[in-house]
Each structure stands twice: as structure tokens, then as C-alpha cells.
Amino acid sequence: MTTFTILTSGCAHNFSDSEQMAGLLKEAKFDLIQDVETADIIIFNTCTVKSPSESAFFTNLEKIKTQHPYKTIVIAGCIPQADPLNPKLKDYCLLGTRQIHKIVEVVEEALNNNVVRLLETGEMPPLNLPRVRRNPVVGVIPISLGCLGACTFCKTKSARFTLQSYPIADIKREVEHALNDGVREIWLTSQDTFCYGFDLGTDLVALLKELVTVSGEYMIRIGMGNPDHLPKIKQGLLEIYQHPKIFKFLHLPLQAGHDETLKEMKRRYAVEDFVSAVQEFRAEIPEITIMTDIIVGYPTETDEEYQATIEVMRKTTPACINISRFWPRPGTKAAKLEPLPGEIVNHRSKTLTAIFQNISQMQNERWQGWEGKIIIDEKGTQENQWIGRNFAYKPVLVDGNFKLGDRLDVKIIKTTTFDLRGEVIRREVIR
């Protein structure tokens, strides 16, 4: 049997796409394996958000092509969609972000040494494609493609385009199918969940109200949503977040803590919008886990503006902060700006990282002595170590003989900078 492997980088949406491509290939009698050395076909599902991700892909591509010149290679995802004329891609079959349902066709052409490029953007991949789940208890479900933003630093829109949402009924059927497969966590993903449905005359709140009616033991994690769309749905979102099937987890990217930097970035909100949103969600749900994203070293960012970002982080104390150094992405407006000196960017990044670690440590200490349920959704790095999530999506490490999907009652006996350590009180297995 012809074997294949998929090397995926990037966001949850990319991993969902890889699951569907693997499902289609398996249905077509190809055999999925994890070993690059022995796979007949290597599919790269790529990410173009950051320069390091793109550079790492091309380095890995060249390495594999040199070491295994006779392997069949297909390149899918955001890099070929956003940059199809890149000379480094000219000898490979390319598959765009909205053509993943045609992966079998592309692989068969590649096996016959035909170079094809399916990069059309006029359709959306069906949601109900077969899947091979990366994690059998986590169902990653795209609710929309693209966004409504115009950020100067971001190349994602050239790969995912303008917002197109899947109908609520289609998403609900996919949730039901996932639960029938034994999934215990539903991850709703898109480039911006908070503008879901605006193109269909609906919104995220309406979707969530429908999804929580599905019977079963499961929790829903809502993916990243931008602050500029939050006012349109905030009141309804605050209410639906109270539902026991919704993880108390809010991923709200700030990117910069000064209005002038946000203006330069073409982010359509003010710092106060972010601050007030965090305060309102915390007032309603004190235990909520707040996650945000910060870009350090945007070319126009002054020392004063950077210090403002630090002050906002200290004021709002997010439990998780994704810190990214600015990278000029070809084809974006920000790429034309004069970059800041590397030593300045490095210093700002290290300083903010140290502040974040202090905040994270303090946030985690609040959970000392907490007792409650977790869902095991990941194997730990140590023998007999497992990772579960509580109602606020906090990672809890436990030791024992468990398996994915187990529900445990635990008590937090120790906290670290990045996780909680639990002692198992009772085990409840959901069949």
C-alpha cells in the first residue's frame, strides 16, 4: 500500500485541514504513517504567519529533497496559496487552502510526475469530510474562513481571504459527528471567531446557543476573536459563557498597548476596548483564563509605546501571552517600513517575557487547593504523566494509569509558571 505522512505547521485550522486531507487519502486506500523516512508521499501543510515558520519550511523541504530525491512531495496550505509564484515552489504540486478536498487528485497527479496547482478560491471545502483525528478526544472544527481585517503586518488574509462562514446547521452536524466518534473537547477555530456569521446574517452567540443543545459529555473551546468585533456580540457572549459546556477561556489579541501603534497596524479598536472587555469578562467570570497576543518591535513602536504595552499587561494580567517579534512579511504594508534595530527588539521581547512569566506564576498560584473535574486530553512528557483541562482550560498535570477522555476529580497541590499539578481524588470514565 502507498504510504503518506503530513507535516503540519501553524494554527488549529491548519491541523483541522490536515485531519481532513488524511481522512480523504485513507478513504482512497493510502496508508497514513508518521515516519518521514519510510513514507512514499510527504505532504507539507504550511503556515505563512511568521517568517521563521516559512524559513523553517523551506529549510526542511530542501533537506528532505536532498536526502530523499525520489519521494513524492505535495505542498499545501498558506504558503502556496499566498505566494504561488515563489521559484522555490515551481517543481511541486500545490494545493490551496480552499482546495483541500481535492488532495487525492493532487497526490495521484504527483505520483504520475505531473505538476498541478489547485489554488482556486471560489469554493469552501465541505465540513463533513472524513477525518483522521490528530487527537481522538479533540474535535477541531472550522466555523469560518478568512477575516474582515486589514492588518498591515499580517499575510494570512492573502492565504485565507475575506470572511466566509459555514452555516450553523453544518457546524452542528459536525459537532454531533465528532461526539459520536468519542470526542470530549470541541475546538471552534477560524481566523477570527468573533466575526463568525456576519456574512450570513447571524453571529457566534447564535451558533453557541445551538451547539450547547447537543447532548453529551463535552466542552467547547472558543478560538481567537478580535476586540473590534466583540462589542457587537459581547452581551450575548457573556451570557452564553456561563453555560457549563463552554470553557471559561477567552483568547483576545491586543497586539500592542498603545493606540498610536494600533493605528499604525490598522487594528480597528483602542487599548481601552481591550481593557474594558477583560474587566467585564472577569467581573462575570472571575476564574476565566485570558489569553492575548503581543507583537514586539513593530517598526513605528517607540519606547513610550512599548512601555504602554507593559503597563497594559500589568493592569490586565492575562494568564497566557503569545509574544511574537515583528517579522516583515513580503507583500504586506509593514514590510515597507524601516525595521527597528535587532538589539532593541530582543531587549523588549526578553523584558516582556520575564513580566509574563511573573504574571503567569501569580495567576496559577490562585488555583492552589482548587478541587474539581478535568478532562484528560493529552499525554505528558514523563512516564504515567497525563495532562487534563479544567473548566477554565487550565492545564493540570496528573500521574497515574489513565487514558485520553477520562474525567477525573482532582485537587491542585502545586503550581508552576506554566501549569497546575493535581492529585487525583476520583476517576470517572465516560464510555
Image (spheres, rainbow, N blue to C red):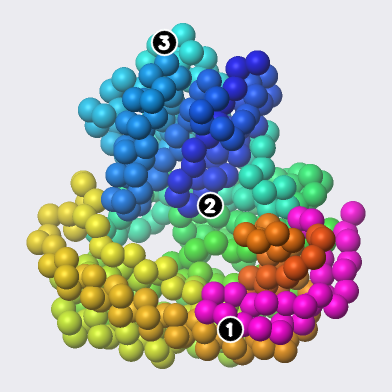
Circle 2 is placed at which residue position?
12
Mark 1 or 2: the one toward you: 1
Dot 2 alpha-carbon crowd within 10 angstroms: few under 14, some 14 to 19, many 20 or more = some
Q: What stretch is highlighted in magenta?
A: 403-431
Q: In this view, does 78 lie above or below 341?
A: above
Indicate which disc, 3 or 1, sits on the residue closer to the N terminus: 3
Residues 164 and 421: in front is 421
- Residue tagged 3: 113
Q: What element carries label 3?
A: loop
- Main secondary structure along the magenta-highlighted residues: strand
Please give the residue where the numbered disc 1 appears in the rendered image: 364
Q: Using the rendered view, name the quadrant where residue 58 is placed.
A: top left
- Classify 86 as above or below 245: above
* Residue in front for this viewpoint, 83 or 147: 83
Please give left or right for residue 277 compared with residue 182 in the image. Answer: left
From the viewer's side, name the closer residue of 373 and 204.
Answer: 373
Q: Can residue 193 be seen in this view?
A: yes
Magenta run includes residue 416 = yes
| Residue at x 42%, y 16% (from the top left corner) | 70
Q: Is 424 on the left-hand or right-hand side of 146?
A: right
Q: Position of residue 400 (x, y in %)?
A: 79, 65
